[in-house]
Each structure stands twice: as C-alpha cells, then as structure tokens.
C-alpha cells in the first residue's frame, strides 16, 4: 500500500504503547488524566494497526524501510553456470 508511512517496528511499538495507555486510561477513567490516556492510547493503537500516521505525512516522515537497490552479487548478465 502506498499510504503506509510506519515501519514494522514503529507499528509494533505504537500498538503496544496504545494497549498500555488504553488500559491505564480505563483504570483512571473517572478523571481527566484517564480520559487523556485513553484517547492517546486509542490514537496510538489505531495508527499502529492502520500503518499510517497523519503527523508523519504532514512532516514528510516515513519509517518504512525501502527495499535495497541492486544486489552486487546478483548480476544476471555475467552469471556463470
């Protein structure tokens, strides 16, 4: 997908942090801090699941690893059998 701008490790960290923040927010749901943690956790989990971060797009950031260029040992023209 072209719109992905989060790499695998970035997504994993976001999902883990999102779950932790959701649980913390749920436990403190009766105050403003709990609500804030819950909202931030939901955003972190959601962006981790989808693989797209609007802030990354805004600032032109991407943590997706680009495929390596030409492999120097894979030259098909001079392939010796």
Image (cartoon, rainbow, N blue to C red):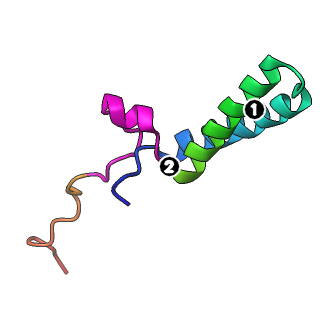
- Nearest to the observer: residue 8 or residue 14: 14
Residue that badge 1 annotates: 38
Asked if 20 appears above or below 2 in the picture, the reply is above
- Judge left or right: residue 11 versus residue 26: left
Magenta span covers which residues? 52-68
Looking at the rendered structure, the secondary structure element under dot 2 is loop
Mark 1 is surrounded, within 10 Å at the Cα level, by few (under 14), some (14 to 19) or many (20 or more) other residues, namely: many
**Percent x, y of residue 72:** 20, 55
Predominant secondary structure in magenta?
loop
- Judge left or right: residue 30 versus residue 39: right
Disc 2 versus disc 1: distance between alpha carbons? 20 Å
* Residue 19 visible at all: yes
Residue occupying image coordinates x 89% and y 25%: 28
Residue that badge 2 annotates: 51
Quadrant location, the N terminus? bottom left
Quadrant location, the C terminus? bottom left
Asked if residue 5 is among those painted magenta in the image, a careful observer would answer no
Asked if residue 56 is among those painted magenta in the image, a careful observer would answer yes
Looking at the rendered structure, the secondary structure element under dot 1 is helix
- Nearest to the observer: residue 75 or residue 14: 14
Closest to the camera, between mark 2 and mark 1, is: 1
Mark 2 is surrounded, within 10 Å at the Cα level, by few (under 14), some (14 to 19) or many (20 or more) other residues, namely: many
CB atoms of marks 2 and 1 within 8 Å: no
Q: Specify which label sits upstream in the sequence, 2 or 1.
A: 1
Which quadrant of the structure image shows residue 23? top right
Residue occupying image coordinates x 37% and y 52%: 3
* Residue 61 visible at all: no
In this view, the residue farthest toward the bottom is: 81
Which quadrant of the structure image shows residue 59? top left
């Amino acid at each position: 997908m072209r719109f992905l701008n989060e790499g695998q490790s970035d997504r994993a960290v976001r999902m883990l942090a999102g779950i932790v923040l959701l649980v913390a927010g749920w436990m403190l749901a009766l105050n403003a801090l709990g609500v804030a943690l819950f909202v931030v956790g939901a955003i972190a989990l959601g962006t981790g699941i989808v693989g797209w971060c609007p802030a990354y797009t805004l600032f032109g950031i991407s943590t997706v690893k680009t495929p390596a260029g030409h492999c120097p040992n894979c030259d098909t023209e001079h392939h010796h059998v």
